Every structure is written in structure tokens, then in C-alpha cells.
Amino acid sequence: MYPTLLAIHNIIRWVVLGSLVFGVFTSVEGLLTKRDYTRVDMITRGITSGVSHLQLLIGLLLYASVSPITKSFLQNGAQGNDQLLFFGVWHAAAMILAVVLITIGAAIAKRASTDRKKFKATLIWFAISLLVILSAIPWFRPFFRAF
Ligand code: HEM
């Protein structure tokens, strides 16, 4: 269960990053070329939001009941151990914030009255979320993990 969930969480990270970068890039391009907000933009928004919520769920499951690292953190605190502190506090808090930002951005973009406002909302909220995620990914871990 633990290796499988960790491997899934590892891979979904790339889908979250890819859809966020694509969303930011196409929003800039949409604003610059003044094109319409199309079905592809709606699908990108939906995939980014859906996949980040899935990652949030798996992360919460790892955190609350599967990971030996967070289990140790919850029982004994960080005890001066950087890795325990990273996963116990920073990774979880920053990633929850990032998913909240994506959710707010997607909702504002969905309800916005003009295509320009949709692109702007996507650009601002997804870009901030992307920065938060980049700062909280454990880059010291493997980039891919076998199941
Ligand atoms: C967009 C959101 C997230 C991304 C991109 C992300 C990314 C990652 C990555 C790349 C790893 C390392 C995986 C590996 O070592 O193979 C990891 C580990 C972990 N993440 Fe996340 N994560 C996200 C959200 C969350 C959330 C919301 C939580 C909990 C509230 C969480 C809890 C954990 C835990 C507990 C571990 C590893 C523990 C261990 O190694 O035992 N993650 N995450």
C-alpha cells in the first residue's frame, strides 16, 4: 500500500505540474493574441483542478495513515530532523494552500464574464499556485518511482 501510493503520488506530481504550466502558458498566449476562450481552455482548467484534488486526497491519505515519516512526526514531533519537519509541516501546508489557490482560480475563471477575465484569472491564480508547489516539492526525492 505505502510503495504504491507513494509511486502514484510521485507520478501525479508531473501531471499537476504539466497542466499548471500549460494553463499558465495558454493564458498568456490567449491574452496576447486576444483569442477566444475555447473548449481546450475549459478542459485544461478542469484537468488541473481535478488532478490537483486527486493529489490532495492521496497526500492526505499518505499523511494521516500510511507514511512512516508523518506517523513519526505526529507521534514525536520533528526532533530536529529536517525531513520530518518538511513532510510534517511545510509540504502538507503549502500543498493544501496551492490546491485551494487552484480551486479559487478555476472558480473565478469559470464565472468570469469575458474571455479576457477568464485568461487573467487562470494566469494569476495558477501561476501563484505553481510557485508554491515548486517551492514545496521534495526535489531531493526520486523523479520517478517504480510501483
Ligand atoms: C499538488 C500537490 C502535491 C504535490 C505536487 C506533491 C508532491 C509530492 C512528491 C513529489 C512527493 C515525493 C514522492 C516520492 O518520494 O516518490 C511527495 C511525498 C509526500 N506527500 Fe505530497 N504532494 C502534494 C500534496 C500533498 C498533500 C496535500 C499532502 C498532505 C496533506 C502530501 C503529503 C505527502 C507525504 C506524507 C509524502 C511522503 C511521505 C513519505 O515519503 O513517507 N502531499 N509529495
Image: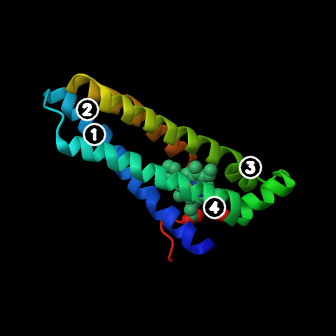
Q: Earlier in the sequence, mark 4 or mark 2?
A: 2
Instruction: Identify the residue at horizontal 18%, vertical 27% (top origin).
Output: 32
Q: Is residue 61 left or right of residue 10?
A: right
C-alpha distance separating marks 2 and 1: 5 Å
Q: Earlier in the sequence, mark 2 or mark 3?
A: 2
Residue 94 pos. (x, y %): 59, 41
Name the residue that disc number 3 marks.
85
Q: How is the image coloured?
A: rainbow
C-alpha distance separating marks 2 and 3: 36 Å
In the image shown, does 144 or 5 lie closer to the viewer?
A: 5
Instruction: Identify the residue at horizontal 37%, vertical 47% (top origin).
Output: 48
Residue 28 marker: 2
Residue 97 visible? The answer is yes
C-alpha distance separating marks 3 and 4: 15 Å
Which quadrant: the N terminus? bottom right
Instruction: Identify the residue at horizontal 33%, vertical 46% (top origin).
Output: 46
| Label 2 element class | helix
Residue 7 pos. (x, y %): 52, 69
Name the residue that disc number 1 marks.
25
Vertical order, 147 against 99 (above or below): below
| Label 4 element class | helix
Q: Is residue 93 left or right of residue 112?
A: right
Q: Give, as a three-letter code, the residue at label 1.
A: Phe
Q: Are marks 2 and 1 in contact (CB under 8 Å)?
A: yes
Q: Earlier in the sequence, mark 3 or mark 4?
A: 4
Residue 62 marker: 4
* Disc 4 residue: CB within 8 Å of ligand 1: yes
